[in-house]
Image (tube, rainbow, N blue to C red):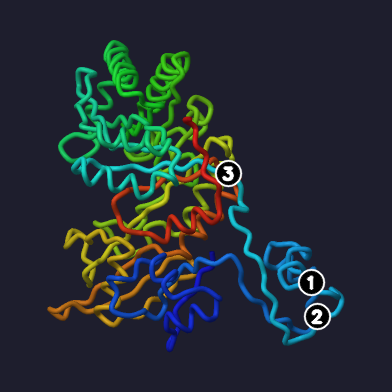
Amino acid sequence: MDIHVVRQGDSLYTIAQRYGTGVDEIYLANQLADLPYLIVGQTLVIPTTEVTHTVRRGDTLFTIAKRYGTTTASIIALNAIENPDRIEPGMTLRIPVREKNYGFIEVNAYIEPSTPQRETQIIREVGQYLTYLSPFSYQVREDGSLVPLNDAAMLAEARAHRTAPLLVITNFRDGNFDTELVDTILNNTALQDTLIANMLSVMRAKRYYGVNIDFERISPENRQAYNNFLRRVVAALRPQGFVTSTALAPMDADVKTGAWHGAHDYAAHGEIVDFVVIMTYEWGWSGGPPYAVAPIDLVEDVIRYAVSVIPSRKIIMGMPLYGYDWRLPYMPGGDWARRVSPQRALQIAAERGAEIRFDRQTASPTFRYYDDDGAEHEVWFEDARSVREKLLLVNKYDLRGVSYWVLGVEFPQNWIVLDSMFNIVKVVP
């Protein structure tokens, strides 16, 4: 696989010729059926097993092989070179592309309930790339019971792809994470016993692989109470063969104040649970000013801190499958941005004649356009380049893997890039 950024004058034919592949292969890989034309600044994933290199003065087979992450022997074999010491400037060499050369990772993805038919189709399309599937969510009640979730279709399709389901437990109530609800649970061991028993009952009955606890907006003074609750969960689940994981808010230092961060103790979670999912997204969010959803510089700040207090192989880094479209000018308390898929973002750019710009600091694509009413909009989204940059952090910091929020958002390039870089671990037979 290679990534091409569309330039003025490019066509699928000229791009295919350049990379030695077919127009149909590029068209299908990028699902271009809904686009009227290519957009300047758009990325295309190129499904190819080789690239070409034009020899320059000073090049040797060794330096060329090092540049492309391959070996001199493979270049010699592919090009039938008889004398490796005699390559001339201007010569075109075929370079084999190494696939899956970043090792093995685990991949989680959250999915929101819809209809059994849609859930099945979504999982069928991406199940081969997933280690875990996390239906969102089983909501905790004040008496320690769980709001039922119709997850039968999701679990059946997950099993068909050897994808391990995780039982997501949240304090979500009436459209938001409820502080009073979670504080009540964390300060009552009898309620915790009831909740843990209900978790175990569901996991056994529905053959869940483990649990993902996503308690948010906890009062900071309950930081230790949350840690103690997690110890009790692990003590109950681990002997039964279940794994325990948590979802953590992103932070680049040990923040002990604030409802979103104060009760999330990175070091303690790293010691207690089997792994953590760090929600490294939503810097650009629907109620805030236009910005990248997961800017690479800020994501790396979080990961750099996380690995200083959590074993790196216990860390799963969050990644978004979506972007936002803001109506300008942004006003606090004004219109909220609408969520858009990367595919829809490209459609908008094509329909409105926008040119896509890649912001280097955040490693994210963005563009502006005017709607039919003359209002200006700003869009930030994800593309093959931004995905690759974030996946490189997994390799750089030796992380356990990545977690996607949320399935059902059209982004075919993500799965191609992921699959080309990593082998996906399957933990169930």
Vertical order, 192 against 267 (above or below): above
Q: Describe residue 393's horizontal placement relative to residue 342 as left or right.
A: right
Whether residue 358 can be seen here: yes
Q: Nearer the viewer, residue 225 or 270?
A: 270
Q: Is residue 134 above or below residue 95?
A: above
Which numbered dot is residue 104? 3
Residue visible at 21% across and 44% down? 117
Q: Quadrant of residue 24?
A: bottom left
Pointer 2 residue:
87
Could you tell me the amino acid type at mark 1? Answer: Leu
Expressed as whole percent of the image width and height from the top left, the position of residue 400 reads 54, 40
Q: Where is 15 relative to 132, above or below?
A: below
Q: Nearer the viewer, residue 66 or 317?
A: 66
Q: Secondary structure at mark 3?
A: strand
> Horizontal placement of 19 versus 222: left or right?
right
Labelled pair 2, 1 in contact (Cβ < 8 Å): yes
Quadrant containing the N terminus is bottom right
Residue 362 appears anywhere in the view: no
Residue 393 in the image, given as x and y percentages of width and height:
55, 53
Q: For the residue carrying disc 2, how many other residues have a C-alpha within 10 Å: few (<14), some (14-19), or many (20+)?
A: some
Q: Report the residue at 79% width, 84% height from top.
A: 88
| Amino acid type at mark 2 | Ile
Q: Which residue is mark 1?
A: 61
* Residue type for callout 3: Phe
Q: Position of residue 423 (x, y in %)?
A: 55, 46
Q: Position of residue 196 (x, y in %)?
A: 33, 17
